[in-house]
Each structure stands twice: as structure tokens, then as C-alpha cells.
Image (cartoon, rainbow, N blue to C red):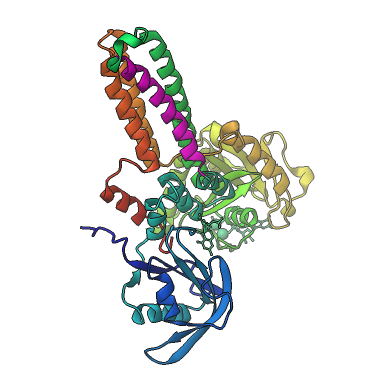
């Protein structure tokens, strides 16, 4: 059982990236009633700005138990309620090595009682509980941190600014208006005109449309978050891994002249002309008895099915032959971005048979030739209207609550159709409103909230 999080404690965690172990500077964040006192215990400073809110000042970390100085640091303090969590916050900016950072944290904990290491997401949870942000903002911050491409980051930031909450609140207010139309007539029947089933039905229909658009756009959201997948498919040694490296401008995949170099799937996230894309390098397809390579080749065939789009590569030196055509026949036409003839540098370009190559791009990946033409093909195929005009999208949890709300509104249909007593409608509308409230974090149990925040990053 997850223990209920104690919000009385003062919490501390490394707030900066530590996964690589090293960095110029690391930030340790301390939040809670004892944040300032506990840091005062381990910081020596002569600064005239010391412990003022929203200032930076200079000092040293001192371990009083061992009577030793540990690091020279900068310190930021934010007094409650004007901080990210709404509590007192102290940030210790120390040197970024693993040993230093851990020693500073250890010193903070050993020199103070009532300070403990924060659980994942606990700073955000406190910001939420203290009303600094709503749940959609907290979730958007987490999404921003985990963004794999620029487009997804841009959209996540709109959520951080409160754009999801704003959209949900608009729909919620629409429903509250409909609810009051019903309830006014239940409570003060004689003062109001008769309940109009048609008006109500029309208004609910408009609200449902808004919800459906939001759900539809959000389905594309997952696509934006993960990127449109483009698999590089072809026989061995045609230059698939070379292309992955060229497009990602990184030496991500191993390239050798040995056929069968790539075994496992290799993925790179990137943004091409504002389109979020995931390029997938696969094992070259050929007849082989090699056990591991065959597993890789099976995965390549799976990728033909599972990716959104495909670039088929072949070597111009060898030409496009029967084996290629057999593989190409397995690719759904609408998925094929282009049949890419690579290694143009190895052939006399006049000899290329242009007849079969109307949809083709010729490249020399080695000499950096033809990339522009390929990018044009990619943009033409993937740069559909799909991602235009999407400024926010909901995550799975939020979509699920919104879908529940839609069901509540659908349940008004039979009541209206059969002209059943109109006060029955208020139950459905109320439940709909409740489901919207869950999106922004109201009406949720503590366990559910703990569960949501526990999936956030450490130090966030
Ligand atoms: N050093 C540092 N950088 C950071 C954060 C942080 O906590 N510390 N953030 C955190 O994740 C993000 C920025 N978000 C923040 C949101 C609110 C407040 C804040 O202090 N709000 C106060 C006062 C605002 C003001 O002075 O106008 C408030 O809301 O009352 C700080 C950072 C990213 N960068
Ligand atoms: N001449 C020439 N050689 C190239 C070109 N592109 C790639 N190569 C070479 O072709 C060989 C195979 O390239 P890879 O990128 O490993 O090919 P692959 O399709 O990933 O191969 P497998 O992973 O084994 O299926 C390497 O020696 C590359 O340097 C090109 O445009 N011209
Ligand atoms: K190879
Ligand atoms: Mg390869």
C-alpha cells in the first residue's frame, strides 16, 4: 500500500538533470515550513541579500556534524505563498558532480530533522494542493519535461499556461447553464416558462460537438507526442543506417560495409519542418541462417505493418531487382513516401533507368546529395493538415473523463425523445459536470491523485 503523502514535512530533491551524472551546476530544491531554517543550518553567508525572497545570494555549505565546508554555492529563496509550490522554497545551486550533490543532500538531511527526500512529483502535487496550478497544468509540466520533439513541447507548454483548463472550463460553464435551466424550473416552476426539450436538446448537441472535437484532436495528440513514424526498409547495405544518421545529424546507428550490421530497431525523434517525426532504422532484409539477424528481419516486416510511413531504399549500384519488388509488394501504397535509390556516386547518372522511377528520389548519402529532395517528399506525405490548428491535446486520463462526460450527455437522448420528466436530465448533466471537474483535478480521491503524481519525474 502506498502511504498517504505527508504534506507537513519539508521535502528536498535534486531538481536538475542528474541521469548523466555530471553537469556544471545542480539545483537542490527544498520546500516546506522548515525549508529556510534547515538551509540556514548548513549555509554560511555574508550576503546582504541573504534569505530575502526572489534574490540570489552567495554562500558555503557547511556540515556542522563534521565541521567541514563542502561546497561554494548560490542560493535562491522564495517565500510562501509566492513560490512554485506555494510553500517556502530554498534552492541550493551547487557544483554538479554526483559526489558533491549527494553530499550536500546528505548534509541537509543529517543536520536537520523533519526534512526528507521528496517522492516523485511531490513538488507538483503540493503546487496543486495549494491551488497554484490545476491538475492539467501539472500534467502538462510533466509532458513538457518528457517531450520528445519540439511540436509536442510547444503544445505541452500551452497546457502549462492553462489552456486545457480554460477549454474545459468553457464546456463546464455551458453545462452549468443548462443545469440551471432545469433546476430553476424544478425549484420555482411557476416563475419560469415551460421547459423546452428542443432548446435543451439543441444546446446539448452543440456542447457535445465541442467535446467531440477536443477528443478527436487529442487522439492526434498521442501521434504528435510520439511523432509520425517513418520506417527505413530495404535489403542489407543499401544505406538505411547512413540515412538515419544523416537525418538526425547524429552518429546514432552503426554503419559498416558488412551486410547485416543493424539487428535491432533504432529510433530517432526529430522535427522536420515543424512535423514531429520518429525515424526507425531496421535490419536489412535478406536470406540468412543467422538466428539473431532473422529475428531482426522479422521485426523489419512487422515495421512495414506498424509504422505510419515507409521509405524503401535500394542501391543504385545493384539496381532495383526482383527481391526488392517482392518486399515493396508488401508495402501498402499509401504508406510509401518514396523508393530511394542510394549510392548515386557509384554510377553514371545517365545510365539510370528513369522509367520505373517516377516516384523515386536518387541520393548519395555518402556525399550528402539529394537530402533536400527527400525532405520535400517527407513533408508532402506527412505534413498533412493533421497537425495544423492543434494548440492543446488531452492525455489519456483527461480523454477518459471527457468521454465519460460525453456518455452522460448521450444519456439525455432517450429522456428527451420520450419526453420523460425533465428533472431526470439534471442527473446526467450533473454527472457530466462532475466528470469535467475530474479533468482539472477536483472530485478525485487522494489515492488517485497520489497515483497520478507518483508517475512524475523525481524532483518535479
Ligand atoms: N530555479 C527554478 N527554475 C524554474 C522553476 C523553479 O521552481 N526554480 N520552475 C518550477 O517548476 C519553472 C518555472 N515555474 C515557476 C512558477 C512559479 C514560480 C513562482 O515563484 N511563482 C510565484 C511568484 C511569481 C512572481 O514573482 O511573479 C507565485 O506564483 O506566486 C516560480 C517558477 C521552471 N524554472
Ligand atoms: N558509395 C556510397 N556508399 C554508401 C552510401 N551510403 C552508404 N554507403 C555505404 O554503404 C555501406 C552500408 O551502409 P549502412 O548504412 O550500414 O547500410 P544499411 O542499409 O544500414 O545496412 P544493414 O544494417 O547491414 O542492413 C557502408 O559502408 C556505407 O558507408 C552512398 O551514398 N555511397
Ligand atoms: K551495413
Ligand atoms: Mg543498418
Vertical relation: 254 (above or below) 406: below
Question: Viewed as shown, does residue 23 lie left or right of 306?
Answer: right
The image shows a total of numbered marks equal to 0
Question: Between 120 and 56, which is closer to the camera in this rendering?
Answer: 56
In the rendered image, the quadrant that contains the C terminus is bottom left
Q: Indicate the position of residue 452 as horizontal and vertical percent values.
A: 34, 50
The residue at the point 73 percent across, 57 percent down is 367
The residue at the point 36 percent across, 54 percent down is 453
Q: For the view shown, which residue lies furthest in the left direction? A: 1
Question: Between 101 and 322, which is closer to the camera in this rendering?
Answer: 101
Question: Between 299 and 173, which is closer to the camera in this rendering?
Answer: 173
Vertical relation: 406 (above or below) 342: above
Magenta residues: mostly which secondary structure? helix
Q: Which residues are magenta?
A: 162-185
Q: Indicate the position of residue 245 as horizontal and vertical percent values.
A: 61, 57
The residue at the point 34 percent across, 81 percent down is 110
In the rendered image, the quadrant that contains the N terminus is bottom left
Q: Indicate the position of residue 136 as horizontal and vertical percent values.
A: 43, 44
In the rendered image, residue 65 lying in the magenta stretch gets the answer no
Q: Indicate the position of residue 403 as horizontal and vertical percent values.
A: 36, 31
| View quadrant of ligand 4 | bottom right
Amino acid at each position: 500500500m502506498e502511504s498517504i503523502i505527508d504534506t507537513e514535512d519539508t521535502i528536498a530533491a535534486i531538481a536538475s538533470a542528474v541521469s548523466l551524472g555530471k553537469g556544471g551546476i545542480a539545483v537542490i530544491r527544498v520546500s516546506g515550513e522548515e525549508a529556510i531554517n534547515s538551509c540556514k543550518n548548513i549555509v554560511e553567508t555574508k550576503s546582504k541579500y541573504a534569505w530575502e525572497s526572489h534574490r540570489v545570494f552567495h554562500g558555503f555549505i557547511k556540515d556542522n556534524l563534521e565541521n567541514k565546508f563542502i561546497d561554494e554555492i548560490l542560493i535562491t529563496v522564495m517565500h510562501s505563498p509566492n513560490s512554485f509550490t506555494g510553500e517556502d522554497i530554498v534552492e541550493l545551486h551547487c557544483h554538479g558532480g554526483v559526489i558533491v550533490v549527494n553530499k550536500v543532500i546528505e548534509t541537509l538531511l543529517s543536520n536537520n530533522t523533519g526534512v526528507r527526500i521528496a517522492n516523485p512529483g511531490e513538488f507538483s502535487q503540493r503546487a496543486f494542493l495549494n491551488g497554484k496550478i490545476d491538475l492539467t497544468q501539472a500534467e502538462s509540466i510533466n509532458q513538457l519535461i518528457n517531450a520528445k520533439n519540439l511540436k509536442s513541447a510547444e503544445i505541452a507548454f500551452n497546457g502549462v499556461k492553462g489552456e486545457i483548463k480554460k477549454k474545459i472550463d468553457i464546456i463546464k460553464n455551458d453545462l452549468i447553464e443548462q443545469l440551471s435551466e432545469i433546476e430553476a424550473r424544478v425549484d420555482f416552476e411557476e416563475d419560469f416558462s415551460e421547459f423546452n426539450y428542443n432548446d435543451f436538446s439543441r444546446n446539448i448537441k452543440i456542447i457535445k460537438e465541442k467535446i467531440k472535437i477536443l477528443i478527436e484532436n487529442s487522439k492526434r495528440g498521442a501521434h504528435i507526442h510520439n511523432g509520425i513514424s517513418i520506417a527505413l526498409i530495404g535489403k542489407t547495405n543499401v544505406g538505411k543506417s547512413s540515412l538515419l544518421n544523416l537525418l538526425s545529424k547524429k552518429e546514432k546507428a552503426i554503419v559498416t560495409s558488412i551486410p547485416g550490421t543493424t539487428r535491432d530497431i533504432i529510433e530517432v525523434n526529430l522535427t522536420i519542418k515543424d512535423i514531429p517525426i520518429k525515424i526507425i532504422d531496421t535490419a536489412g532484409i535478406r536470406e540468412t541462417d543467422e538466428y539473431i539477424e532473422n529475428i531482426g528481419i522479422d521485426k523489419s516486416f512487422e515495421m512495414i505493418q506498424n509504422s505510419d510511413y515507409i521509405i524503401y531504399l535500394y542501391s543504385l549500384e545493384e539496381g532495383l531487382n526482383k527481391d526488392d519488388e517482392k518486399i515493396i509488394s508488401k508495402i501498402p501504397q499509401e504508406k510509401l513516401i518514396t523508393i530511394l535509390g542510394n549510392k548515386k556516386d557509384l554510377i553514371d547518372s545517365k545510365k539510370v533507368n528513369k522509367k520505373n522511377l517516377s516516384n523515386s528520389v536518387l541520393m548519395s548519402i555518402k556525399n550528402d546529395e539529394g537530402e533536400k529532395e527527400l525532405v520535400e517528399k517527407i513533408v508532402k506525405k506527412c505534413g498533412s493538415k493533421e497537425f495544423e490548428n492543434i494548440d492543446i491535446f488531452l492525455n489519456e486520463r483527461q480523454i477518459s473523463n471527457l468521454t465519460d462526460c460525453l456518455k452522460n450527455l448521450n444519456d439525455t437522448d432517450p429522456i428527451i425523445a420520450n419526453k420523460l420528466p425533465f428533472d431526470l436530465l439534471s442527473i446526467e448533466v450533473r454527472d457530466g459536470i462532475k466528470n469535467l471537474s475530474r479533468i482539472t483535478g477536483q472530485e478525485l480521491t487522494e489515492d488517485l491523485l497520489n497515483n497520478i503524481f507518483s508517475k512524475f519525474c523525481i524532483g518535479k
